[in-house]
Image (cartoon, grey):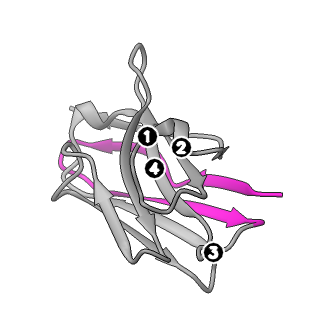
Amino acid sequence: EVQLQASGGGLVQVGGSLRLSCAASGLTFDDYAIAWFRQAPGKEREGVSCISYSASSSNYADSAEGRFTISLDNAKNMVYLQMNSLKPEDTAVYYCAASTWQQCMLHSQLFGFWGQGTQVTVSS
């Protein structure tokens, strides 16, 4: 059974940093791409970043490019999202998700496995 558990959210000031973690079980990164999505109140869920171990690729939404870094630790089955220079508009619930589609496209319908979210709040 594939399970994903996101953690690491919290309250941070504008310009601050957070590192989100996603603990994955029941899968190997050889077979799944892992992505971070987020959903702010009243808004649709949007893709933030994705990483594919088998394809040796990662990508980012424009809003995350240059500020966020996705990485994985294959030995620990963990995926991380380092978020720097945080802005109020980054406030959202962040979810990690897994997809057998390994081309790392940030479309939520491609991701069949989801973890619970972790709240990120950026205060000004």
The vertical placement of 1 against 48, above or below, is below
Residue of label 4: 36
Residue drawn at the location 18% of the way across and 49% of the way down: 15
Q: Earlier in the sequence, mark 1 or mark 4?
A: 4
Q: Residue 96's x, y, as percent?
A: 54, 50
* Inter-mark Cα distance, 2 to 3: 21 Å
Q: Residues within 10 Å of mark 2 (few under 14, many from 20)?
A: some
Q: Which residue is mark 3?
A: 77
The residue type indicated by label 3 comes to Asn
Which range is magenta? 1-26
Precedes in sequence: disc 4 or disc 3: 4
Identity of the residue drawn at 53% across and 36% down: 109
Looking at the image, the residue that sits furthest to the right is: 1
User: Which mark's residue is nearer the viewer, 2 or 4?
Assistant: 2
Secondary structure character of the magenta stretch overall: strand
Residue 107's disc is 1
Q: Where does the C terminus fall, quadrant-wise?
A: top left
Secondary-structure class at tag 2: helix
- What is the quadrant of the N terminus in the image? bottom right
Mark 2 and mark 3 lie on one chain; the one further toward the N terminus is 3
Type of amino acid under label 1: His
